[in-house]
Amino acid sequence: MIARFLHHGGRVAEAARLFGGVQEGWLDLSTGLNPVPWPIPPALTPDWSALPDPDGLARLETVAARHFGVDPALCCAVPGSETALRLLGHVLGLPGRALVPCYRSHVEAFAESRPVRFGEEPAAPEVVVMANPNNPDGAQHARGDVVDWAERIERQGGWLIVDEAFADCRPETSVADAVDGGRLIVLRSFGKFFGLAGLRLGFVLAPPEILSTLRALMGSWPLHTAALTIGAAAYGDIDWIARTRQELPPRAAKLDAVLRRHDLEPRGDCPLFRLVTGCAAGEVFERLARARILVRPFEQFPDWLRFGVPADAAALARLDAALGHG
């Protein structure tokens, strides 16, 4: 049954059908989402009766660009960074290479995709895709090393796309401010840090000519009204952002302690998830599923499991108890 959960996290309804219980009773640790999402104010009500306002889109991009540290002219809002990556696969018109291990979509976005190692010297014009911090292992590469690699790829006529879906947790690693007239593109995700993945909101930071082509492909209304309204308010909530950046690492450290107590050694520097390697992944996955806890297995790495960080002490204690019932 584990085979049904090898491609993406978050399939709680299917887990409940296969292992029992009601969906609401499951603890979903299969994603890398902030388990304590940004609280949407009750008064923040989108106007569903009107088409999305172009001024609202411009306002969202301006507020988000300020958060990323870039010129708004280099920032384009998209209906999820995965959608943007697949569009870029067509726009750039070059073969692609994906850093390993990687998101499944980093490979699927390019028909001729091949693996690449970080810092590998390009031999031809290609699009290289990497995540920083990386998923699923949480590895981080220093900002200067990423910029240096981008420059070497550019000299060969290629592009570097840096997926910074988890960079809100580690802003010092971001290369967003290095996006200018060169061949560096940065993807940012709203859903991971703010914990609202259902909004399907992301951003492309790229030279204006790339953004112009993307906008033409997406049409007049790329985002729904809720994404415009909620996204702008969340990126403007400076206090919540600062507080969350402080709260996430201690929460992840508590998960580390629980995993180690059960002889599972956590890896990664992203405070939204931890990777465990060299374990009996299938056995642990099913044991947790029987306890109505969903974690993330991997098709290419049968001894890997990724654990999202639990939201609170009760959720952590539930995981601790389930891991102890082997």
Image (tube, rainbow, N blue to C red):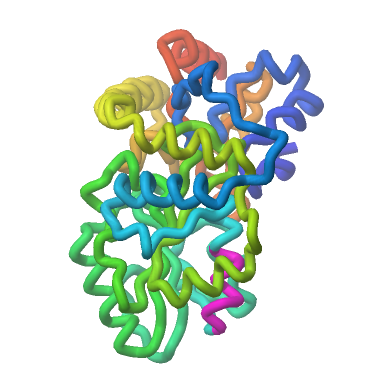
Q: Nearer the viewer, residue 60 or 11?
A: 60
Residue drawn at point x = 49 percent, y = 14 percent: 315
Q: Nearer the viewer, residue 229 or 248?
A: 229
Q: In which quarter of the image is the N terminus?
A: top right
Picture quarter containing residue 322? Answer: top right
The image shows residue 213 at horizontal and vertical percentages of 55, 74
The image shows residue 169 at horizontal and vertical percentages of 32, 39
Q: Point out the residue furthest to the left here.
A: 144
Q: How many labels does the image show?
A: 0
Against 251, is 218 above or below?
below
Q: Is residue 14 magenta?
A: no
The image shows residue 154 at horizontal and vertical percentages of 33, 83
Residue drawn at point x = 56 percent, y = 40 percent: 227
The image shows residue 123 at horizontal and vertical percentages of 38, 90
Q: Is residue 126 left or right of residue 256?
A: right
The magenta span reads: 85-93
Q: Is the magenta stretch mostly helix, strand or loop?
A: helix
Residue drawn at point x = 55 percent, y = 55 percent: 78
